Image (cartoon, helix red, strand yellow):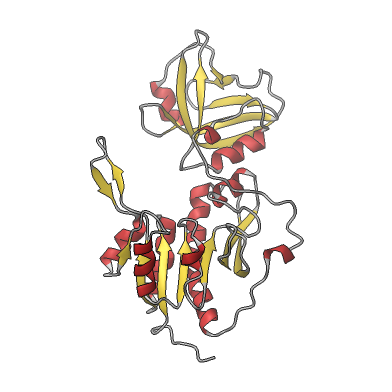
Amino acid sequence: MMMKKKEDLRIVYMGTPEFAVESLKRLVEGGYNVVGVITMPDKPVGRHQDKLQPSAVKQYAVEHGLRVLQPERLKDPAFVDELRSLQADLQIVVAFRMLPEVVWAMPPLGTFNLHASLLPQYRGAAPINWAVINGETETGITTFFLRHEIDTGEIIQQVRIPIADTDNVGVVHDKLMELGGQLVVDTVDRILADDIHPIPQESIADCGPLRPAPKIFKETCRMDWQGKTLKQLYDFVRGLSPYPAAWTEMKDSTGKAYGLKIYATEKEPCTPGEPVGTVVSNGKTYFKVAVDGGYLHLKEIQLTGKKRMAIEDFLRGFRTTDELHMD
């Protein structure tokens, strides 16, 4: 079959957050023919929800003169007709929404997705967070063709990276974003060269029990001081930092509660002398919590209504002789 050159291959790109900008940027700067960009409708923001915030992908697309479509519903006949009029040969999806078949089955060369995990592991909305939360030492990115069930299509390519014990989700996100941009371009080139051999995910037998990556809500982010070990709590904080951030309530002996977000911690493995949840501090340089397996030192936190700060700065402004406990 006669393959097109990259300048002639008509690509429709779909994505919304910053993570998706890098791949679009690589395509544009690489001279690929992006004929349309699909992204979420502008989001109301501000105190009165009276301002509209465009997605990161839309901002980039508009700056580079690309055609932008922002459908409310992906099955809307008017949108489907407009999408069809773009006559895409290939569609690429990075951090977007679940597509109906009428959309993903449209282009002759198919629709592929960039997913921030080593599929079939961590299917779902928050793969980077859950990989770090679960203490994984390796993750990666995958390109795969879209099919009916979410994140289950045949794998085209994968790239693996290590996760260091000190990496938080922000660090891993940025590494995968950069690698993802390159992998999208590589995948397009291989499709153009007719050099792909997609692998069914069911055939990957050595990946162990499947771990999901569901959407993260506020209650997901609450610290479980009683139910988790030192290592699990440390990984939990890393897997939610810098966003959306783990949180907890700290109470004094009168029952007064202080809301805290926790951004960075350190482990002190030992057998603590206090009950789990007890705060131990010298009031100047350290602020640690007794947990199963040691103490979790809080290094960067944010008190409700205050700014994020190092623990030494927090202790300078937070004076209490009362006994404190994490709830």
Left or right, residue 87 beside residue 152: left
Give whichever of 270, 293 is nearer the camera: 293
Extreme-front residue of the structure: 77
Q: Quadrant of the C terminus?
A: top right
Residue at 67% across, 49% down? 211
Quadrant of the rendered image containing residue 276: top right
Extreme-bottom residue of the structure: 2
Residue at 42% across, 59% down? 75
Number of numbered markers: 0
Give whichever of 10, 169 is nearer the camera: 10
Left or right, residue 294 beside residue 55: right
Position in image of residue 26 (x %, y %):
41, 71
Residue at 72% across, 63% down? 202
Is 80 drawn above or below residue 32 in the view shown?
above
Position in image of residue 182 (x %, y %):
49, 70
Q: Is residue 183 visible?
A: no
Position in image of residue 323 (x %, y %):
54, 12
Left or right, residue 65 beside residue 165: left
Q: Quadrant of the N terminus?
A: bottom right
Position in image of residue 145 (x %, y %):
57, 68
Q: Is residue 252 visible?
A: yes
Is 256 drawn above or below residue 326 in the view shown?
above
Residue at 48% across, 66% down? 102
